Image (cartoon, coloured by chain):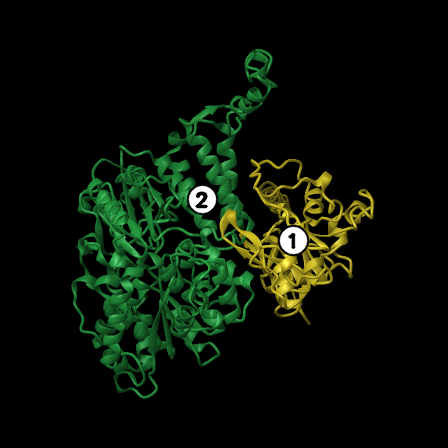
Chain colours: A yellow, B green
């Protein structure tokens, strides 16, 4: 018989070594996340999946579940903090949803709707982040990067290429590509790479497919992310 | 120079520093010292020779403040920007230097000779204002010294030819207790521990109740036991000499004067845990200590205190290598330090697993502070019970305090735990004290009504910094300086710290510039809470401490900066319209805010 913990008062069973988020998902319970992806080990950077255990905040994607724990997740307090984290992600980049090809398929936008983020609250940083349109098949719009490192991890661990990496630090942290010129065209990146198809926001976009599905009929236009993310085929991509 | 880094130089560095990806940071540090910056072609060639993606090499090089990917001059002058240096006049001196060398802060001079910029606390608070010139430290800066430095730079004098007196660093030991007052013959503590056997030695460590001096206060013997019992035979002892907490410098003094105690403590940890490899992570700001530390290591090897069969014990094999940091406070966090030791960006790891089971290169690893390791020598010499007999119930032994700021006698003071803050203030010659920052920027701001509180884990814990501010100081500016520090040093991994520290900096600057509104204090409270709750590591969760404490204890310092009861934008709205007025050639009332019809309330 497997052990259980309480998630918002309801029992969730888990196998030894399973994280809180994994066990919750297996039990059909959704915990918001952005940088977590079922095909990769936990990353723990976005902090959207924070839950409260015995008064402590932990990343549920990275914290192994323990017998008898009482975990708070879908509460006004935790959702309030998640909303603030979303606000932080919105103001640090340049996110203009109405003109973004990813609108309706974007996890950041979908979570903001789901968690009822009504305003950005904080001052915008308006960073200067040039677009890289050099590659024949893929456009990089760094304005929307949330540093989940899914492209970094996919290219390094699945595609075996190491196309992306982060440089600098703090608020100046940013993506670089694997070329002395700094241009994606000068790498061996391919539109078929897993890294080209994993961005949860609108940084890595395929060219010539813009608006193939009209806005209003896209994934998160049809159903909220807390339902979409729980579908068996949901791998984080739309 | 950028196009022509000789292949022979690269080969030589890879030969001496190692040529595997885990050696990357040491390779970059060595090349930076020789080439003054790391040109793009060099990054590409290193990536090729190390067999790793170029992007990752660039990512590591871009993380550390002391590595330059663009030309930064043959002389890189960095003014220590801690509040203590500022109080001693560092800003005016830096302006003088910039004017004299005809350059702007952070921008290389036109002739490519020199860059003058600021850096986080260089660990010279007892003899500031301080600068680093390349990898050398200069303290007690004044107008005359600034002029002397400018002349040396203008005459292209190599650092090795600068007057040695410029680089003189005082230890400033003002109060010595158990550790600093008793000279120890190298190897004598180790001989006692070896005589006890590994288990007997660990029993003494347990009896001593020694707790980590780096700030967290974890019981050292528990850490050592966990490492000893962890699966895997290839254990590692790491000494954390990344003394980056603003206002701290006691580890500098220990490494400068008592390096043998530190290395002997590492060897004692190896005896307890069975480790064969030791690593000392030396912060880049202390690179000038490296030659003498290497000499001490060589002497210990010659004396049979390092190497194989230490003190004639078959199977007691242990040696120590020194790794250099390159300007990143977050690497003082133990898992970020391990990442940095592995040649990576200093991003704190997810825990669990903890370093004692999965540390350096996945091996069971003990990470201890410089002072903690030095203290173990006392335990070996006098026994655990004798050590536990001093201090308080939960804080055994003595503590080194780095005292700086508004006092007559700044320096290092060793006290038994439990000493009151008032006692320390009396001893260092501080009067008319407004506040004391105990434990550095991430520590506690102590107000006068609390001066009877005691330095101890159970009262006011401290990693060692003790910064004194008298009533002439503006405590808001102290907190603002610390907030800038955390924003600069955030690794940027997690959302709350990366964005939260930058936002907090924005709010503090808004208040400082006269645009403060009451709502801002509520926003600051909210950010403080998010940082504390949601951050990935201790840097983010302690970043709001100075603001939380000063808002609680010195609220008027904030309130007198509040100009508006309601919302106020962070910039001058009317000023923002200036360009539009210029472009349209208008300057009438309708082209201004808040004049007649302009306001949109």
Where is residue A75? Give x, y as percent.
64, 46
Check the image and name the residue furthest to the bottom. Answer: B314
Q: Position of residue B485 (x, y in %)?
A: 41, 46
Q: Quick one: label 1, few (<14), some, or many (20+) residues within 10 Å?
A: many
Q: Is residue B187 visible?
A: yes
Could you tell me which chain the residue with mark 1 belongs to? A
As drawn, the label of residue B469 is none
Q: Nearer the viewer, mark 1 or mark 2?
A: 1
Mark 2, chain letter?
Answer: B
Give the answer, above or below, for where A40 lies relative to A58: below
Q: Is residue B297 above or below residue A50?
A: below
Left or right placement of residue B300 versus residue B36 in this view: left
Mark 1 vs mark 2: same chain? no
Query: Looking at the figure, which quarter contains the C terminus of chain A?
Result: bottom right
User: Where does label 2 land, which residue?
Assistant: B544
Quarter residue B164 falls in: bottom left
- Tell me the CA gap for discs 1 and 2: 25 Å
Classify residue B240 by image quadrant.
bottom left
The front one of B574 and A218 is: B574
Q: Quadrant of residue A151?
A: bottom right
Between A162 and A229, the one lying in front of the other is: A162
Residue B232 on image: x %, y %: 47, 79
At mark 2, the secondary structure is: loop
Q: Is residue B510 left or right of residue B187?
A: right
Q: Please, what secondary structure does the residue beneath circle 1 have?
A: loop
Residue B294 placement (x, y as % from top left): 28, 70
Residue on which disc 1 sits: A34
Q: Are marks 1 and 2 in contact (CB under 8 Å)?
A: no
Can residue B348 be seen here? The reply is no
Query: From the viewer's perspective, is B531 left or right of A40?
Result: left
Q: Quadrant of the N terminus of chain A?
A: bottom right
């Amino acid at each position: 018989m497997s052990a259980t913990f309480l998630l918002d008062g309801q029992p969730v069973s888990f196998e030894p070594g399973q994280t809180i988020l994994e066990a919750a998902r297996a039990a059909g319970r959704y915990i918001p996340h952005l940088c977590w992806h079922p095909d990769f080990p936990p990353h723990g950077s976005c902090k959207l999946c924070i839950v409260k255990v015995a008064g402590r905040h932990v990343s549920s994607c990275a914290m192994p579940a323990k017998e008898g724990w009482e975990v708070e997740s879908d509460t006004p307090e935790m959702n309030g903090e998640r909303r603030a984290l979303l606000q932080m992600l919105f103001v640090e980049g340049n996110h203009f949803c109405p003109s973004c090809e990813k609108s309706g398929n974007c996890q950041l936008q979908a979570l903001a709707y789901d968690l009822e983020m009504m305003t950005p609250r904080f001052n915008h940083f308006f960073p200067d982040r040039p677009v890289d349109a050099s590659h024949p098949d893929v456009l990089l719009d760094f304005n929307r990067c949330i540093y989940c490192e899914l492209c970094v991890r996919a290219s390094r661990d699945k595609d075996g290429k190491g196309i992306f990496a982060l440089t600098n630090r703090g608020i100046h942290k940013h993506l670089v590509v694997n070329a002395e010129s700094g241009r994606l065209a000068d790498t061996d990146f391919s539109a078929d790479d897993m890294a080209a198809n994993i961005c949860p926001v609108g940084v890595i976009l395929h060219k010539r497919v813009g608006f193939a599905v009209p806005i209003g009929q896209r994934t998160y236009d049809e159903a909220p992310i807390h339902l979409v993310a729980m579908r068996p085929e949901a791998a984080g991509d739309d | 120079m950028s196009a022509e880094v000789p292949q022979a130089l690269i080969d030589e560095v890879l030969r001496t520093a190692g040529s595997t990806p885990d050696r990357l940071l040491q390779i970059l540090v060595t090349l930076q010292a020789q080439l003054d910056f790391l040109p793009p072609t060099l990054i590409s060639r290193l990536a090729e020779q190390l067999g790793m993606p170029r992007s990752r090499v660039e990512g590591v090089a871009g993380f550390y403040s002391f590595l330059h990917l663009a030309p930064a001059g043959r002389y890189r002058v960095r003014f220590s920007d801690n509040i203590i240096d500022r109080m001693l006049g560092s800003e005016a001196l830096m302006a003088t230097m910039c004017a004299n060398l005809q350059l702007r802060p952070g921008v290389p001079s036109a002739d490519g000779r020199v860059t003058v910029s600021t850096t986080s606390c260089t660990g010279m608070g007892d003899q500031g204002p301080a600068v680093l010139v390349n990898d050398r430290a200069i303290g007690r800066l004044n107008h005359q010294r600034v002029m002397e430095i400018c002349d040396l730079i203008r005459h292209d004098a190599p650092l090795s030819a600068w007057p040695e007196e410029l680089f003189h660093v005082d230890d400033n030991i003002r109060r010595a207790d158990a550790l600093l007052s008793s000279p120890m013959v190298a190897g004598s503590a180790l001989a006692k521990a070896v005589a006890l056997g590994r288990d007997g030695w660990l029993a003494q460590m347990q009896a001593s109740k020694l707790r980590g001096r780096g700030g967290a206060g974890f019981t050292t013997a528990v850490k050592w036991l966990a490492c000893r019992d962890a699966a895997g035979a290839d254990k590692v002892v790491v000494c954390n000499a990344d003394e980056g907490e603003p206002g701290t410098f006691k580890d500098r003094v220990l490494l400068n004067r008592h390096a043998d105690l530190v290395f002997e403590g590492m060897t004692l940890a190896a005896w307890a845990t069975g480790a064969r490899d030791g690593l000392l992570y030396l912060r880049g700001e202390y690179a000038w200590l490296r030659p003498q530390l290497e000499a001490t290591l060589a002497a210990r090897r010659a004396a049979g205190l390092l190497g194989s069969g230490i003190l004639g014990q078959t199977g007691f094999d242990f040696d120590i290598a020194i790794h250099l940091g390159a300007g990143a406070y977050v690497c003082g966090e133990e898992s970020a330090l391990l990442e940095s030791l592995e040649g990576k960006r200093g991003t704190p790891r997810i825990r669990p697993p903890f370093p004692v089971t999965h540390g350096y290169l996945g091996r069971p690893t003990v990470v201890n502070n410089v002072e903690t390791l030095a203290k173990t020598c006392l335990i070996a010499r006098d026994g655990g019970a004798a050590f536990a007999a001093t201090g308080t119930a939960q804080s055994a032994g003595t503590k080194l305090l780095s005292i700086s700021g508004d006092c007559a006698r700044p320096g290092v003071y060793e006290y038994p735990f439990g000493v009151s803050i008032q006692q320390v203030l009396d001893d260092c010659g501080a009067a008319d004290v407004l506040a004391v920052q105990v434990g550095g920027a991430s520590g506690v701001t102590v107000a006068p009504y609390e001066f009877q509180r005691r330095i101890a884990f159970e009262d006011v814990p401290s990693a060692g910094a003790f910064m004194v501010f008298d009533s002439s100081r503006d405590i808001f500016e102290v907190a603002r300086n610390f907030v800038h520090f955390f924003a600069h040093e955030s690794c940027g991994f997690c959302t709350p710290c990366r964005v939260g520290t930058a936002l907090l900096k924005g709010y503090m600057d808004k208040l400082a510039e006269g645009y403060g509104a009451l709502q801002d204090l509520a926003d600051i409270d909210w950010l403080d809470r998010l940082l504390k709750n949601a951050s990935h590591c201790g840097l983010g969760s302690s970043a709001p401490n100075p603001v939380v404490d000063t808002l609680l204890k010195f609220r008027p310092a904030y309130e007198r900066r509040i100009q508006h009861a309601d919302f106020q934008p962070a910039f001058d709205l009317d000023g923002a319209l200036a360009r539009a007025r210029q472009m349209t050639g208008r300057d009438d009332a309708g082209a201004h805010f808040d004049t007649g019809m302009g306001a949109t309330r």
